Amino acid sequence: MDETKVATEEVAVPAKFAKIVKEIEEMSVLDLNELVKIFEAKFGVSAAAVAAGPAAGAAPAEEAKSTVGVELTDGGANKIAIIKIVKEVLALGLKEAKDLVDAAPSMLKADMKMEEATELKKKIEEAGGKVTFK
């Protein structure tokens, strides 16, 4: 009951934000969802981290869904480029990065944020390697 009460209370909106708040109030739920995703991507933040109360309990489950394991399935013909990418992105030493690439298929990193994993996959595939998400 308290949650409903909180949602219906009037909040004082400063004049400088009145136009933005009014536009947000008029958006559909789908548009709001898209807007939140754009903010998360643009500013590198997560709306789940700001949630409080019962929503905070649900945040770890949502976060688990937004993480993946990144597995290098093929080092490709240009292993040196792949080794450099793995070394840089995972902050490994040269030997550790080389061992991971040479041992393909090998798990590069478990529980990596989806955005970071996608970026890593893109870099590796551009260099000629193959990556799968687990």
Image (cartoon, rainbow, N blue to C red):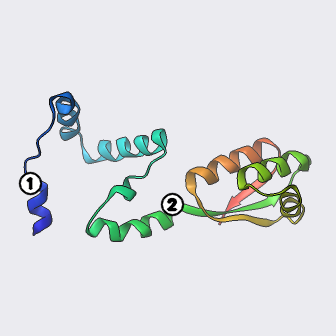
Precedes in sequence: disc 2 or disc 1:
1
The residue lying at 17 percent from left, 31 percent from top is 18
Amino acid type assigned to the residue bearing label 2 in the image = Ser
For disc 2, the marked residue is 66
- Residue 8's label in the rendered image is 1
The residue lying at 73 percent from left, 44 percent from top is 123
Q: Nearer the viewer, residue 98 or 126?
A: 98
- Tag 2's secondary structure? loop
**Count of labels shown?**
2
Could you say which quadrant of the image residue 7 lies in?
Answer: bottom left
The residue lying at 78 percent from left, 57 percent from top is 92
C-alpha gap between disc 2 and disc 1: 31 Å
Q: Position of residue 22 (x, y in %)?
A: 17, 34
Q: Position of residue 55 (x, y in %)?
A: 30, 65
Q: Is residue 17 left or right of residue 108?
A: left
Could you say which quadrant of the image residue 101 lies in?
Answer: bottom right
Q: Position of residue 80 (x, y in %)?
A: 90, 47
